[in-house]
Amino acid sequence: MKTFKLTGPIETGGRKYSELTLRPMKAKDMRLLMAEENAADNQINLLAALAEVPCGVIDELELADYNELCLFTREQLQAKKPVTPRR
């Protein structure tokens, strides 16, 4: 899990968010990247699922915060298992 402090607080649905914590991606999350024809909608759905917040929260992010969260997902997609040397 990784916590991101937001540039400024977001208020939506009667709740205020000043940070978002994203859980690590799982294989099942890959479905969210392919669910819609619109890639932006897929990314917003994925971020909302990882942060366990409504999509409206992601919609209201400053672009710099959105880009930082997207970078986290790209890093997750490229993650590899550590290789243990054989003896």
Image (spheres, rainbow, N blue to C red):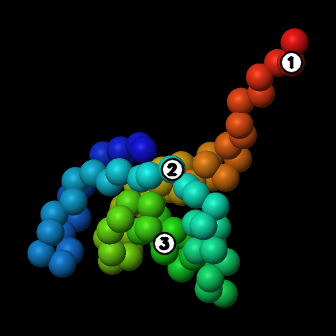
User: Relative to residue 17, is residue 20 drawn left or right?
Assistant: right
Label 1 is placed on what type of residue?
A: Arg
Counting residues from the start of the chain, the first of labels 2 and 3 encountered is 2
Q: Residue furthest top?
A: 87
Q: Residue furthest left?
A: 14
Q: Nearer the viewer, residue 84 or 61?
A: 84
Residue 28: x and y in percent read 60, 67
| Residue that label 2 marks | 24
Counting residues from the start of the chain, the first of labels 2 and 1 encountered is 2
Camera-near label (3 vs 1) is 1
Mark 3 is surrounded, within 10 Å at the Cα level, by few (under 14), some (14 to 19) or many (20 or more) other residues, namely many
Q: Nearer the viewer, residue 85 or 16?
A: 85
Q: CA distance from mark 2 to mark 1?
A: 28 Å
Label 3 is placed on what type of residue?
A: Ile
**Residue in the image at 38% along x and 76% along y:** 55
Counting residues from the start of the chain, the first of labels 3 and 1 encountered is 3
Q: Nearer the viewer, residue 5 or 31?
A: 31
**Residue in the image at 44% along x and 68% along y:** 49
Q: Residue furthest front?
A: 87
Residue 73: x and y in percent read 57, 54
- Asked which quadrant contains residue 61, the reply is bottom left
Mark 2 is surrounded, within 10 Å at the Cα level, by few (under 14), some (14 to 19) or many (20 or more) other residues, namely few
Q: CA distance from mark 2 to mark 3?
A: 16 Å
Q: Any mark on residue 86, and which?
A: 1
Label 2 is placed on what type of residue?
A: Pro
Q: Are marks 2 and 3 in contact (CB under 8 Å)?
A: no
Residue 46: x and y in percent read 51, 68
Q: Any mark on residue 44, and which?
A: 3
Camera-near label (2 vs 1) is 1
Residue 2: x and y in percent read 41, 43
Mark 1 is surrounded, within 10 Å at the Cα level, by few (under 14), some (14 to 19) or many (20 or more) other residues, namely few
